[in-house]
Image (cartoon, rainbow, N blue to C red):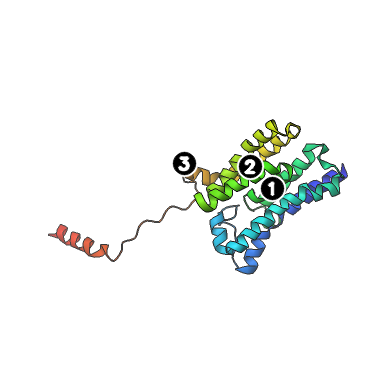
Amino acid sequence: MQHLLYYFAACFLIGSLPIGEAVARLKTGKTLLLPGSRNTRPPGEMFDTLGIPTGILICLLDGFKGFITVFPLAIYFLGENPYQYWWPVSLGGFLTVFGHCNSLFLGFKGGRGLAPTFGVMITLLPVPAVFASLLGFWLAFWGLSSKPGALSAAGAMPLLSIAWVLAIRPDEINYLYVVATMSIWTMWEHRDELLSYVGIRPANFPAAPLPQATAHDTPESSTEDKAQGL
């Protein structure tokens, strides 16, 4: 029991490591935290701040946090076969994602959890996780943008996992619980974007700036004013 508590605590602390925020402050002197929110900036703004190579590296490192907690760390704390009981490893993976979104080192603020979620999933259910990741990357870089790509990957993960488990690996059916939980959690963390896609602007989303008059428009408006004066 004591080893189990140590494992859960280690998962939360590893998930809490603010890798992206630390790199952003060291490299640019800026923060990735969104003003007035407990979350980091959207992925597009993060890549603008860090640069694409550094941003990709940060995503990989955040994903590695999920991988390390459900593979080598689980073996270290829970024994050589930690997967004989599905729930300790699954809960450890969830605590990693929870720590990433509520970092102890950032006053319980943090990221949105997608990268460590796929780090966990690629260890527990690698085939569905890889296909969901490929879908997300395709939508992000060729189809749409990073946000719908990420959300599409999170939405595809439970569907692909259900098909994989029922058709090929029925012995892993219990992992569907953690897949569903993490997918719902990811959608909740991205709820502002989801609302904006259906035309609802959340309170913390800035309003679109009003169009400004250009130099070309000024003479026309002046002419109209004179006409109205006449």
Task: For mark 3, give the secondary structure.
Answer: loop
Q: Position of residue 172 (x, y in %)?
A: 74, 35
Q: Amino acid at mark 1?
A: Val
Left/right of residue 182 with respect to residue 203 in the rendered view: right
Question: Who is closer to the viewer here, 128 or 24?
Answer: 128
Crowdedness of circle 1 by 10 Å Cα count: few (<14), some, many (20+)?
many
| Dot 3 or dot 2, earlier in sequence | 2
Could you tell me residue 197's position as x and y percent?
48, 44
Q: Is residue 181 left or right of residue 230?
A: right
Q: Nearer the viewer, residue 37 or 87?
A: 87
Residue at the disc numbered 1: 97
Q: Percent from the top left, x then y, of residue 124?
A: 73, 42
Residue at the image point whose x is 75% and y is 53% from the top: 13
Q: Please name the amino acid that badge 3 sits on.
A: Val
Residue 27 at x, y = what percent? Answer: 63, 68
- Residue pointed to by mark 2: 185
What secondary structure is found at the residue carrying circle 1?
A: helix
Locate the C terminus by quadrant.
bottom left
Can you see residue 179? yes
Residue farthest to the front?
Answer: 168
Per the model, the C-alpha gap separating discs 1 and 2 is: 9 Å
Q: Amino acid at mark 2?
A: Trp
Residue underneath mark 3: 198
Q: Height in image: 159 above or below 55?
A: above
Task: For mark 2, give the secondary structure.
Answer: helix
Q: Are marks 1 and 2 in contact (CB under 8 Å)?
A: yes
Q: Residue at x 87, y 41 (%)?
A: 1
Closer to us: 185 or 38: 185
| Quadrant of the rendered image containing residue 169 | top right
Q: Residue at x 61, y 63 (%)?
A: 53
* Residues at marks 1 and 3, CA–CA distance in whole angstroms: 27 Å
